[in-house]
């Protein structure tokens, strides 16, 4: 009888401990995807799983997103052409891709927390401007921050990684495996769809990965920060 009592007591304590673990609280209407992984190396020659969108800039025009030789291409002139992972929305997430952009003014990077064309975040590498920019659109009003970074237009592939901590409102940006900067966001809309973007003749993307861990923020991001 004593052994059964101890077993029951231990089970109750374990249950209390599990329930006490802090949860990431997200807007009720958001329904973000947790424990999700999407990866595309584009070697299958199709864009299944992607919404191939149009420019954020007015007038809205569709980009010429396509697969060529196992990479994703968009090389029209114009600003902020968007493509998004279909049918999923995210809060905390890590995005990774390889890229190379066309000179003299191509740029590109990630689209993050896209709710509509008035509420979204861009993280873009812009070699012609000498920096990496974070542009937040909040209720149709844009605000941009540029972080200096030198990169030339050449035929070399580079890697870009972004870790978005929606709870602590911070975006961590990495280039070619090195930490560049952290950006404290202004927007309160930190749930939405995610994907890629480019403009001004754009360029190429390959080996895209998106993971949404669904774990408390420090558990997700400490391994990344310690890299």
Image (cartoon, rainbow, N blue to C red):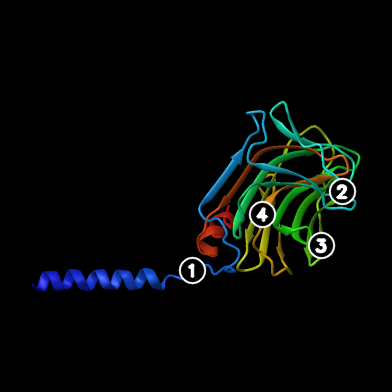
Q: Residue at x 82, y 43 (%)?
A: 62
Identify the residue position indicated by label 4 in the image: 193
Nearest the eye: 146 or 188: 188
- Earlier sequence position, callout 2 versus callout 3: 2
Q: For residue 12, what is the image quadrant?
A: bottom left
Q: Secondary structure at mark 4?
A: strand
Mark 2, Cα crowd under 10 Å, few <14 / some 14-19 / many 20+, is many
Q: Is residue 169 above or below residue 34?
A: below
Rendering coords of residue 121 (x, y %): 74, 58
Q: Is residue 182 above or below residue 85?
A: below
Tell me the CA gap for discs 2 and 1.
38 Å
Identify the residue position indicated by label 2 in the image: 79
Rendering coords of residue 44 (x, y %): 63, 28
Q: Secondary structure at mark 1?
A: loop
Mark 1, Cα crowd under 10 Å, few <14 / some 14-19 / many 20+, is few
Tell me the CA gap for discs 4 and 2.
19 Å
Identify the residue position indicated by label 3 in the image: 145
Q: Secondary structure at mark 3?
A: strand
Q: Mark 1 against mark 3, which lies toward the viewer?
A: 1
- Earlier sequence position, callout 3 versus callout 4: 3
- Earlier sequence position, callout 4 versus callout 2: 2
Identify the residue position indicated by label 1 in the image: 23
The reply to whether callout 2 and callout 1 are in contact (CB within 8 Å) is no
Q: Residue at x 86, y 45 (%)?
A: 61
Q: Residue furthest top?
A: 69
Q: Secondary structure at mark 2?
A: loop
Rendering coords of residue 140 (x, y %): 82, 65
Tell me the CA gap for discs 2 and 3.
17 Å
Tell me the CA gap for discs 4 and 1.
21 Å
């Amino acid at each position: 009888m004593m052994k059964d009592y101890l077993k029951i007591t231990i089970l109750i304590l374990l249950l209390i401990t599990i329930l006490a673990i802090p949860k990431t609280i997200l807007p009720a209407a958001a329904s973000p995807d947790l424990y999700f992984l999407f990866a595309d190396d584009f070697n299958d020659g199709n864009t299944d799983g992607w919404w191939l969108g149009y420019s954020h800039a007015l007038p809205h025009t569709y980009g010429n997103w396509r697969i060529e030789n196992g990479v994703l291409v968009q090389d029209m002139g114009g600003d902020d052409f968007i493509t998004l992972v279909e049918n999923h929305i995210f809060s905390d997430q890590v995005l990774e891709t390889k890229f190379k952009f066309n000179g003299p003014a191509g740029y590109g990077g990630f689209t993050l927390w896209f709710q509509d064309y008035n509420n979204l975040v861009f993280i873009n590498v812009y070699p012609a401007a000498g920096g990496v920019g974070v542009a937040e659109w909040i209720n149709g009003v844009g605000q941009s921050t540029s972080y200096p970074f030198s990169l030339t237009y050449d035929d070399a592939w580079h890697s870009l990684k972004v870790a978005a901590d929606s709870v602590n409102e911070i975006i961590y940006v990495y280039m070619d495996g090195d930490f560049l900067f952290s950006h404290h966001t202004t927007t309160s809309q930190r749930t939405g769809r995610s994907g890629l973007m480019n403009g001004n003749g754009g360029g190429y993307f390959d080996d895209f990965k998106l993971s949404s861990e669904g774990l408390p923020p420090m558990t997700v991001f400490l391994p990344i920060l310690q890299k």
